[in-house]
Image (tube, rainbow, N blue to C red):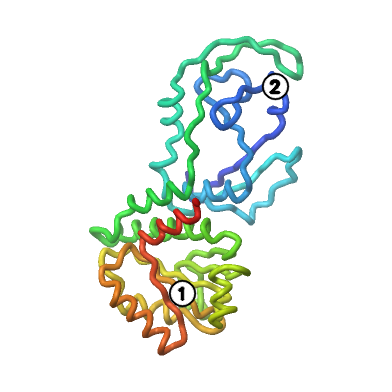
Amino acid sequence: MSKEGRLLWYTQKGMYNFEDAYARLNDGIVTGKRRKEYHMFYTEWKREEINDMLAATGFESDKTFKMSQVSGGNQAYVFNPKRPIIMNRSLILNERLRTEMGSELSLITRQAWRRGETYETLVPNETHQLEVVNLLEVYARELDEIPAGGSDRSTRNLNASKYHWLIFNVLSFIFRNRLKRPQMEEDMADETQKVDITFSNRDDIGFFNQLHERYEIKCPNIMIECKNYTDDIANPEFHQIQSRLNKRTGLFGMIICRDIDDVELALKRSKHISHSDDKIVITITDPEIKDLISYKLE
């Protein structure tokens, strides 16, 4: 798809009200005439679930595109291909359908619900319930698929971009309703600095609320830097996030990286920042991201 292209998500909720106009299959409904190997699946998705699925496959909601009023409770959203594809190997629905359902179809006669005409159509002989795809579980698997670093600059940049977007999607999912307005590479300091990921802190009961209420750490925003390095993060990475923190934007930041061999040294660097500058910087590694995913799934 062209970078200037648009994807329309449209869910029509009318036909499934009539029993002779659909057949249940897997987690949805097959509708329409002349169905052969093509199937339409109907499932009630929430807006945030649609955004999550499409974000994982490279699409971003186009909030500037004005849709005319959609009738009947139908859903219509427009997306742009703005992001890297980070789940292209995981959501192989067509292959799973062929494997689990096969292509065995039967010819049957049906009657159209509106005009009363009869027609022949092919339907599956059996229905099979596909295993539910959980985005967070897929994200955890994809975390292992993205290489750290890279053999050349182009490869390093590509891997880093995928890693940043994957972490962005994971944190947006995990901290939903606590951290709001997720932003990638937001400009700061009169557009002289950038931060990989920022959130607005809207937590009123949990950890991010306690930072302010209990520990008096001003954090209206949460600043996050992602490092897709093969080596341990060092002083330059700690200094970078430290320079982004201030009383106006927030005094709490995170560095998310693949792994840390010298944990004690990283902890000393974090402590030095908190003791000398009243700022808090914590590190989170891939294994800890997976732990957060597990806690969320529980």
Tell me residue 204's x, y (percent). 63, 69
Residue name at image x 47 percent, y 16 percent: 104
Tell me residue 227's x, y (percent). 35, 66
Residue name at image x 69 percent, y 48 percent: 67
Residue name at image x 57 percent, y 59 percent: 176
Q: Residues within 10 Å of mark 2 (few under 14, many from 20)?
A: few
Q: Which residue is mark 2?
A: 19
Dividing the picture into quadrants, the one containing residue 112 is: top right
Q: Is residue 3 above or below residue 29?
A: below
The residue type indicated by label 1 comes to Gly
Q: Which residue is mark 1?
A: 253
Q: What separation in Å lies between label 1 and label 2 (alpha carbons)?
A: 54 Å
Q: Is residue 217 left or right of residue 273?
A: right
Q: Is residue 258 above or below residue 262?
A: above
Tell me residue 36's x, y (percent). 53, 19
Please name whichever residue, 153 or 287, is drawn nearer the observer in this view of the structure: 287
Residue name at image x 62 percent, y 19 percent: 33
Q: Residues within 10 Å of mark 1 (few under 14, many from 20)?
A: many
Dividing the picture into quadrants, the one containing residue 26 is: top right
Dividing the picture into quadrants, the one containing residue 39 is: top right
Q: Is residue 178 left or right of residue 226?
A: right
Considering the numbered disc 1 on the image, is that residue within a helix, a strand or a loop? Answer: strand
Considering the numbered disc 2 on the image, is that residue within a helix, a strand or a loop? Answer: helix
The residue type indicated by label 2 comes to Glu
Q: Is residue 129 above or below residue 282?
A: above
